[in-house]
C-alpha cells in the first residue's frame, strides 16, 4: 500500500470515528485528537504523552444514581487509537491484562480500535534506546492490537491484523492485502526476556542501596512521573454526593500521593519519599513481572522527561545493577 | 417524616468578596441548594452586617478577620454555628493581606495612609487563629465545584474532604508546559491541588494560593529552586499567599 492508499484508509476512519494519533506541536509530538490525515506524525517518534488516557481517562464517572434510578455512565463513542508505537502498544498490552475484568474499561475497549505503527523494526527499538527488553523477531506476536501498520524502507506500508475486529475493519475499508498475526501470549516460548530478568534482580533487594537515600534528597513527590507513565494504572474511586443521589468517580492517582497508602488513624505505609521511590521501581520491575511475567516499564523515558529534578530511570537501573554485582 | 432542612449562612470578613461571587457564579446550581437547605444569611444578597441571634447548622466564612468588628462577628458566628467552614485563601491562610506581616507594618501603613485617618492597623491572621474551624475550602477564589461537593456531602451527613494531591498532578494531566523545568519558580509540587492548575494554563507559576499539600517536599523544592534563584526571589513568591508562614 502506498501513501495515497494509506491516506484513503485513514480518511475513511476519520469520517465516522474519534481518532487519536501522534501530532507534531512545537517540535514535540503529542497524542491528540486528529481531524485530518495531514496532522498525523508518521515518524514513529515517541509522543510526549502516551495513549493511556484513551483507554483510562484521567477522570470518569462510572455510574450515578438519582432516587431509584441507577445509571451506568458508559462512554460509547467509537474511537481509534491510531499509529501507536510499539512501546505504547506494550503498555496497552499490560493494561489489557490488568483491566481484564474491569467492565468500565472493557466497555470502552469494545468501542476502541487499536492501530499500531512502526516506521521500521528493529530500528524503532534502537531509536527508543530501550532498556527493558531486547528486540525479538516475533515481537508482534506478543502484542495486543487490532491492526498494525509497518512502514517499509521503500516507503510502502504493510498491514497486519491482530484480532477479528481488526480484520473486519480492514475488510470494511477495502484493505485486502494483510497478514493475520495470532496473539501468542505475553511470554515468548523462549521464556522471559533476559533484560526483564536482570532488571528485576537489580531492583529486588536494593532497598538498602544508597541510591534511594540520594534520590529522596531531591525528589519532590510531585508524581509527574507516574501521571505521564503509560504503564501506571492506579486510580481512586470516590463517591461524590450530588443534590440528588451520588456519582461514582474514578480518577488517576499515584503511589507518590499521600492518600495512596493511607489507612485509618492517618497512618501511611509510604510516608517517606525514599519508600515511594523504591515502591515505584519495585512495582514496575519486580511485582508486575512476578504477577504477569510481563514488563511493568516499557523504557519510554517519559518519567525522566517530565521530572523537574531529572531523576533518570535508565541510569538508576544501571547503577543498581552495578552495585548489585559488587 | 419530613426532616428539618439544614440552615446555612454565608459570612464575609475583610475580603474582595470574590469567593461569594464565585459561589453565585454557580447560578441555578447554587439556588438549587434551596431544595435541601435553608439559606438564612448571604452577605451579598442583603443589606448590612448580619448580627442576629439565629442558629446555623453550617456557617461559611470568607475573608480575613482584620478589624475589631470582623473579630467580633467571627466569634459570634462561631457560637451560632454547629459547623464552621473557612472558605478561600483569606480565611484559610490569611490571603493577600498577609503580605503586610512580612514588612514593618507601621511603615506600610504610613505609606498607604497619610496621617491619622482613623483606620485600624491590625495583624493579619487566618480565621483559625481566632476560632476553631471545622473545615477549610482553599483557593483564591474558592473552587465553586468543590464547595458544591462539600455541601452535598454535609447534607447527607458525610464528613467531606478534599483530595490531597499536589498541583503538578492536574498540570501534568493537562499536559501544560512545566515552568519549573524551564527554570522559573513554581510552587505546584508543594501546593494542594484542586484548581485544575489554572495558573499553569497561562504559563504562570503556581504561588500556592491553595496552601500546602500534605507531605509536601518543601526542602527539596527549595533546594531545586536555589540552583537558579536567590533566596530573596524564592521568599518573595513564598510570601504572596503566606506559604512562608506554613513552613517550619
Ligand atoms: S517526577 Fe521526579 S520529582 Fe516528581 S515524583 Fe517523580 S521522580 Fe520525584
Ligand atoms: S520509562 Fe518511566 S514512564 Fe516509561 S514506562 Fe518506564 S517508568 Fe513508565
Ligand atoms: S503503584 Fe505507583 S508505580 Fe505502580 S502503577 Fe501505581 S502509581 Fe504506578
Ligand atoms: S509547572 Fe509547576 S505545577 Fe506544573 S508540573 Fe511543573 S512544577 Fe508542577
Ligand atoms: S496554580 Fe497555584 S496559585 Fe494558581 S490557582 Fe492553583 S493553587 Fe492557586
Image (cartoon, coloured by chain):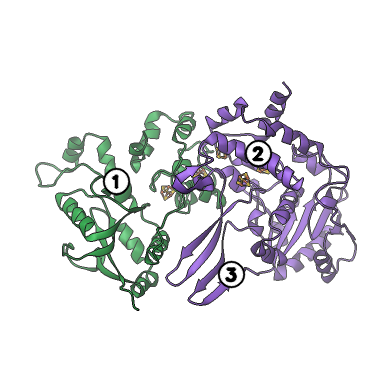
Chain colours: A purple, B green
Q: Is mark 2 within 8 Å of ligand 3?
A: no
Of callouts 3 and 2, which one flags the residue occurring earlier in the amino acid sequence?
A: 3
User: Which secondary structure, mark 1?
Assistant: loop
Provide the residue designation for mark 2: A282
Q: Is mark 3 within 8 Å of ligand 3?
A: no
Quarter that holds the C terminus of chain A: top right
Marks 1 and 3: in contact by CB < 8 Å?
A: no
| Position in image of residue A5 (x %, y %) | 83, 63
Q: CA distance from mark 3 to mark 1?
A: 41 Å
| Along the viewing direction, whichever of A110 and B227 lies nearer the viewer | A110
Q: Are discs 3 and 1 both within one chain?
A: no
Compared with A306, B45 (above or below) is below
| Along the viewing direction, whichever of B15 and B217 lies nearer the viewer | B217
Looking at the rendered structure, which numbered label has been put on residue B94? 1
Chain bearing mark 1: B
Q: State which quadrant residue A304 falls in.
A: top right
Residue B203, visible in the rendered structure? no
Looking at the rendered structure, which numbered label has been put on residue A73? 3
Amino acid at each position: 500500500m502506498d501513501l495515497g492508499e494509506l491516506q484513503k484508509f485513514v480518511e475513511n476512519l476519520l469520517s465516522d470515528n474519534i481518532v487519536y494519533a501522534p501530532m507534531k506541536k512545537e517540535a514535540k509530538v503529542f497524542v491528540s485528537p486528529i481531524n485530518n490525515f495531514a496532522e498525523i506524525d508518521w515518524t514513529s517518534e515517541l509522543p510526549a504523552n502516551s495513549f493511556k488516557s484513551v483507554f483510562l481517562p484521567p477522570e470518569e464517572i462510572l455510574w450515578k444514581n438519582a432516587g431509584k434510578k441507577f445509571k451506568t455512565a458508559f462512554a460509547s463513542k467509537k474511537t481509534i487509537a491510531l499509529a501507536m508505537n510499539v512501546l505504547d502498544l506494550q503498555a496497552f498490552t499490560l493494561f489489557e491484562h490488568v483491566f481484564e475484568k474491569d467492565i468500565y474499561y472493557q466497555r470502552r475497549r469494545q468501542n476502541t480500535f487499536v492501530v499500531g505503527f512502526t516506521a521500521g523494526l528493529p530500528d524503532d527499538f534502537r531509536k527508543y534506546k530501550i532498556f527493558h527488553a531486547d528486540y525479538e523477531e516475533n515481537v508482534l506476536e506478543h502484542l495486543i492490537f487490532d491492526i498494525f501498520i509497518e512502514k517499509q524502507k521503500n516507503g510502502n506500508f504493510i498491514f497486519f491484523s491482530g484480532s477479528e475486529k481488526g480484520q473486519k475493519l480492514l475488510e470494511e475499508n477495502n484493505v485486502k492485502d494483510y497478514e493475520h498475526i495470532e496473539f501468542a501470549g505475553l511470554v515468548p516460548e523462549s521464556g522471559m526476556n533476559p533484560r526483564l530478568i536482570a532488571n528485576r534482580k537489580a531492583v529486588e533487594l536494593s532497598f538498602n542501596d544508597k541510591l534511594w537515600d540520594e534520590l529522596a534528597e531531591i525528589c519532590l513527590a510531585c508524581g509527574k512521573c507516574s501521571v505521564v507513565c503509560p504503564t501506571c494504572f492506579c486510580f481512586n474511586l470516590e463517591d461524590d454526593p450530588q443534590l440528588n443521589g451520588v456519582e461514582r468517580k474514578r480518577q488517576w492517582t499515584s503511589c507518590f500521593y499521600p492518600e495512596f497508602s493511607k489507612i485509618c488513624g492517618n497512618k501511611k505505609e509510604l510516608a517517606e519519599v525514599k519508600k515511594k521511590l523504591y515502591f515505584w521501581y519495585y512495582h514496575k520491575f519486580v511485582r508486575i513481572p512476578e504477577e504477569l511475567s510481563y514488563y511493568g516499564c516499557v523504557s519510554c523515558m517519559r518519567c525522566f522527561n517530565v521530572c523537574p529534578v531529572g531523576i533518570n530511570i535508565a541510569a538508576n537501573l544501571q547503577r543498581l545493577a552495578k552495585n548489585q554485582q559488587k | 417524616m419530613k426532616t428539618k432542612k439544614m440552615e446555612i449562612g454565608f459570612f464575609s470578613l475583610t475580603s474582595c468578596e470574590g469567593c461569594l461571587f464565585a459561589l453565585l457564579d454557580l447560578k441555578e446550581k447554587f439556588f438549587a441548594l434551596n431544595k435541601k437547605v435553608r439559606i438564612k444569611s448571604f452577605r451579598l444578597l442583603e443589606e448590612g452586617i448580619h448580627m442576629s441571634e439565629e442558629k446555623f447548622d453550617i456557617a461559611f466564612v470568607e475573608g480575613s478577620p482584620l478589624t475589631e468588628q470582623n473579630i467580633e462577628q467571627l466569634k459570634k458566628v462561631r457560637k451560632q454555628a454547629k459547623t464552621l467552614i473557612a472558605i478561600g485563601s483569606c480565611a484559610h491562610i490569611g490571603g493577600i493581606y498577609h503580605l503586610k506581616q512580612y514588612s514593618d507594618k507601621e511603615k506600610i501603613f504610613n505609606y498607604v495612609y497619610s496621617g491619622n485617618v482613623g483606620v485600624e492597623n491590625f495583624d493579619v491572621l487566618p480565621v483559625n487563629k481566632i476560632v476553631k474551624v471545622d473545615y477549610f475550602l482553599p483557593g483564591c477564589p474558592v473552587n465553586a465545584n468543590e464547595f458544591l461537593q462539600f455541601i452535598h456531602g454535609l447534607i447527607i451527613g458525610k464528613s467531606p474532604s478534599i483530595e490531597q494531591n499536589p498541583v503538578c498532578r492536574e498540570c501534568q494531566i493537562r499536559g501544560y508546559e512545566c515552568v519549573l523545568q524551564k527554570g522559573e519558580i513554581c510552587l505546584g509540587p508543594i501546593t494542594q491541588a484542586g484548581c485544575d492548575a489554572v495558573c499553569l494554563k497561562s504559563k504562570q507559576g503556581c504561588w500556592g494560593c491553595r496552601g500546602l499539600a500534605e507531605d509536601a517536599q518543601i526542602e527539596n523544592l527549595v533546594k531545586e529552586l536555589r540552583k537558579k534563584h536567590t533566596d530573596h526571589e524564592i521568599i518573595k513568591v513564598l510570601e504572596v499567599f503566606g506559604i512562608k508562614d506554613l513552613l517550619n
